[in-house]
Amino acid sequence: MSEAEPAAASEAAAAAVLDALNATDSNGTEALNATAKFVASPEGTALAYGSLVFMALLPIFFGALRSVTCSKSKNAADMPETITSRDAARFPIIASCTLFGLYLFFKVFSQEYINLLLSVYFFVLGVLALSHTMSPLMSRIFPASIPDKQYQLLFTQGSGESKEEIVNYEFDTKNLICLVISSVVGVWYLLKKHWIANNLFGLAFALNGVELLHLNNVSTGCILLGGLFVYDVFWVFGTNVMVTVAKSFEAPIKLVFPQDLLERGLDASNFAMLGLGDIVIPGIFIALLLRFDVSLKKNSRTYFYSSFLAYIFGLGVTIFVMHTFKHAQPALLYLVPACVGFPVVVALLKGELTEMFRYEETPPEEEESKDDSAESEKKDQ
């Protein structure tokens, strides 16, 4: 759907910011606890971390499934953003520059005004992302008795032969309903900054990221995850930059769940957190492995399930180490070896390692041009 275009267009900056908050956000609420002097009960802690793990798995699982359909789409609005090996190599550098730039901004300018600007920016992106996320569900539950009218928003420049399309946006009644519901959630977030509204936007961002950001092959995925592995470890253990930005940044780029929910209900305020980067970055690699499973045409999802279980294991280790040592941990330190290592071991055991690394995902437009060329050759013959 075209609602996802702004999210895809800003994926480099946004994903860098998301990953910038990985370590601190995914490693609990040490800073918040120190301020509030609240000691969470074992039940509250278990509920919070269990809920975060469950919420992290949802966008990865469903985003990966939707990425398979997205990879076959011939609609320009639904086509994924492909990450090449060159993009993957540059990504940690872009992420580092973005992180340090935010750090300087928060040091120089008023935190209140920066967060106000970010809130408006993420409000727009969040409404579009949530609307795109809801579209498939709305298509299934939309009453047949209500007419589903088609609309088109066309904005052109020039006239005659020099006319150029700037905006060509097609939508229907279902899309309008999704947009209205998403806008209500967005206004709720802007006014209250409630953690449930934050999570709805966060889940939508994560699912859209996994669905629309595609790695072109496994080697590119290894380059991306390896680079961000070093990036995450450096900025968490080497400096205080990431922790400072994470504590100052107010935007729905993390999933949160209160550890004091049992004591204070929905008004709880002591949160355990998980950065969206810790979901999207491994998630796009897991989605790639699902598409590789589909390409094998063996009616099995071996690599997808092995990487999915590896993610659960890596996230569990992250939470355990953080909770044991009471110190911020770079989550990718544990997630990257697990998500890459488990599928590689499976491929070695099955004798498909070479085939896995040779797998190359063809963008829909290139695949379509190949099909057209093949058809024209047949006609010529």
Image (spheres, rainbow, N blue to C red):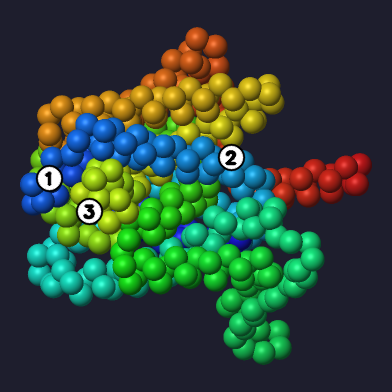
Q: Residue at x 39, y 59 (%)?
A: 197
Residue on which the image places disc 3: 269
One can see residue 256 in this view: yes
Residue 41 figure quarter = top left
Residue 347 in the image, given as x and y percentages of width and height: 50, 17
Residue, x 25% and y 61% (percent of image)? 250
Task: Estimate how packed mark 3 is, as few (under 14), some (14 to 19) or many (20 or more) residues with alpha carbons within 10 Å.
Answer: some
Residues at marks 1 and 3 touching, judged by CB atoms closer than 8 Å: no
- Name the residue nearer the viewer: 66 or 363: 66
User: Which residue has dot 2 on it?
Assistant: 65
Residue 96, how many percent across, how many down? 23, 51
| Marks 2 and 1, how far apart at CA | 40 Å
In the visual, does 349 lie left or right of 78? left
Earlier sequence position, callout 2 versus callout 3: 2
Q: CA distance from mark 1 to mark 3?
A: 10 Å
Report crowding for label 1: few under 14, some 14 to 19, many 20 or more residues within 10 A (C-alpha): few
Q: Is residue 232 visible?
A: no
Give the percent coordinates (x, y) of residue 36. Answer: 10, 51
- What's the residue at 59%, 76% (across, down)? 167
**Sequence-wise first label, 1 or 3:** 1
Which of the marked residues, 2 or 1, is nearer the chain's N terminus?
A: 1
Q: Is residue 162 above or below residue 369?
A: below
Q: Amino acid at mark 2?
A: Leu
Disc 2, disc 3: CB below 8 Å?
no
Dot 3 amino acid type: Ser
Find numbered disc 1 in the image and state the secondary structure of the residue it sits on: loop
Residue identified by numbered label 1: 38
Residue farthest to the bottom?
A: 159
Q: Amino acid at mark 1?
A: Phe
Nearest the viewer among 338 and 180 is 180
Indicate whether 221 appears above or below 147.
above
